[in-house]
Image: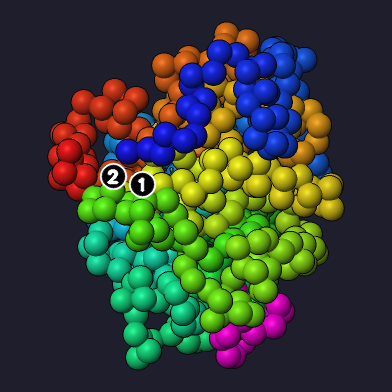
Amino acid sequence: MTDRSFLHLGGLRDVQAFQRHLQKLQISIPCDPYLVSGDASPLAQPLRRGNITLGNRFAIHPMEGWDGTVDGRPTEATFRRWRHFGASGAKLIWGGEAVAVCHEGRANPNQLAIGPHAIDDLSRLREALVEEHNRVVGSIADLMIGLQLTHSGRYSRPNIYDRPEPRILYRHPLLDKRLGIDNEYPILTDGEIRQIIESFQRAAQVAHEAGFDFVDIKHCHGYLGHEFLSAHTRAGDYGGSFENRTRFLREVVTSIDDVAPSLTVGVRLSAFDTVPFRPDSKRSSPGKPGPGVPEPFAALLPYRWGFGVNIHNPIEPDLTEPVQFLSLVEELGIRLVNLSAGSPYYNPHLQRPALYPPSDGYLAPEEPLRGVAQQMQVTRTLKRQFPHLIMVGSAYTYLQDFLPHVAQAAVREGWVDCVGLGRMVLACPTLPLDVISGRGVQRKQLCRTFSDCTTAPRAGLPSGCYPLDPHYKESEEAAVLKRLKRRRTGD
Ligand SMILES: Cc1cc2nc3c(=O)[nH]c(=O)nc-3n(C[C@H](O)[C@H](O)[C@H](O)COP(=O)(O)O)c2cc1C
Ligand code: SF4
């Protein structure tokens, strides 16, 4: 199911046709007409900043697989994914996947979580990635590997995949309803927050002992770290003023310094947001959600439940606080920043632009290239203001055949330091090396944004690229997924 009004990029003949398409749409995305390969490629250039050296400009974004054991340990499918990340040739592995710092903070019952076996499990995962990188690339020089640490907050589902057990910081007038939260539902106390901070500290120590170069204190996608930033209406030490809303980050960083002073810290941030979207009921039919529209917000102005949004028109970004946040990040001695946007739960068109919506989403409300351009422009704006931070950009996968041309131009023109890849590496793990070596992209393997990797977990199935990765394509789960999709659409 897709909205036919948007051009399929796979149908464009060449990069010139893509450039004309951008021009026609009046979308400003840099795009090089030719790719440079080998050592001269802008994407092959090392990046040195302080004590950090990255061997090239590709990064792999963290991506949960929903395939750990119930006690939070990796399975063979998890190892396989991490080996693919290593084989990609990217020299920055941003966190592998979100690992919950405690059981209650898991986003699904198969998410990796810090438990009694974590040091051993995580060091084996890391080693598998390093070994594969060495085998394929021939060297592990200037490879940097992090671990993304998370608490899922509002989106916690630690025990049963379709039973939300939200841990919330404040009452949200739009999101609470979606999770069946009423006014009696408990809000995390300041004391409970302090315990969560201790869990982050323990998890960082585990990551350090497991050999990771850095930990990411996740502040994106509607999970707990991100929710702190919009806790304007919360009373107490962790809500209200900007200082209070960023206390969580400061306390986590200080507590990590106490136990692992040599461990580098990074932050993945949803740099801007918008109000939650839902399918337009007037243009939806059973099993066929219409295009996304914002939830009505006129009665909620000034809007006090977002971060990086214009409070008078919350479907527009306002970067005033994200800039303040990045200044704080610099003050805390953090150099690694990965910029994302919004949330896959309530505005997926912004977070991961796609032609085909996930099962709990809606048809693209706008040309998906606009979502890509918006994330790239915001990153460019922030990069200009913070030249010393190492910035990783997101949402490049939708560019498909033209991802390499855009990535090369974006790095060459200084819009971003590293191009992060999410869905594209699930579909085509060799893309970074294909580009740098000049052997060209494997068109049949390119992610076409079918969203099955997001839909499958919504149905309690592992995530993976069902349409293109043979491991998933031929699995029992693929058959289940197909049946579910057919039943939903009645096709
Ligand atoms: C299956 C799946 C799992 C994801 N899991 C995570 C995660 O654990 N942590 C995170 O920060 N982002 C996660 N993301 C978001 C991606 O890191 C990335 O921001 C998003 O897919 C947009 O990048 P892309 O256009 O290259 O796919 C996930 C995305 C997908 C598709
Ligand atoms: S399932 Fe595969 S093709 Fe579809 S969005 Fe995910 S990675 Fe891309």
The residue tagged 1 is 358
Check disc 1 and give the amino acid type.
Pro
Residue 158 vertical placement versus 84 (above, below): below
User: SS of the residue at dot 2?
Assistant: helix
Residue extent of the magenta highlight: 230-244
Q: Residue at x 54, y 18 (%)?
A: 12
Report if the beta carbon of the residue with label 2 is closer than 8 angstroms to ligand 2.
yes
Q: Quadrant of ligand 2?
A: top left
Measured Cα–Cα span from mark 2 to mark 1: 9 Å
Instruction: Classify residue 398 as left or right of residue 31.
Output: left
Provide residue 222's location: percent of width, then percent of height. 50, 64
Q: Nearer the viewer, residue 23 or 269?
A: 23
Instruction: Classify residue 395 as left or right of residue 246.
Output: left
Report if the beta carbon of the residue with label 1 is closer than 8 angstroms to ligand 2.
no
Q: Nearer the viewer, residue 231 or 139?
A: 231
Residue 237 vertical placement versus 413 (above, below): below
Quadrant where the image shows the N terminus: top left
Provide residue 141's location: percent of width, then percent of height. 66, 27
Provide residue 379's location: percent of width, then percent of height. 71, 47
Residue 265 vertical placement versus 411 (above, below): below
Provide residue 229's location: percent of width, then percent of height. 61, 71
Q: Is residue 231 magenta?
A: yes
Q: Is residue 328 visible?
A: no
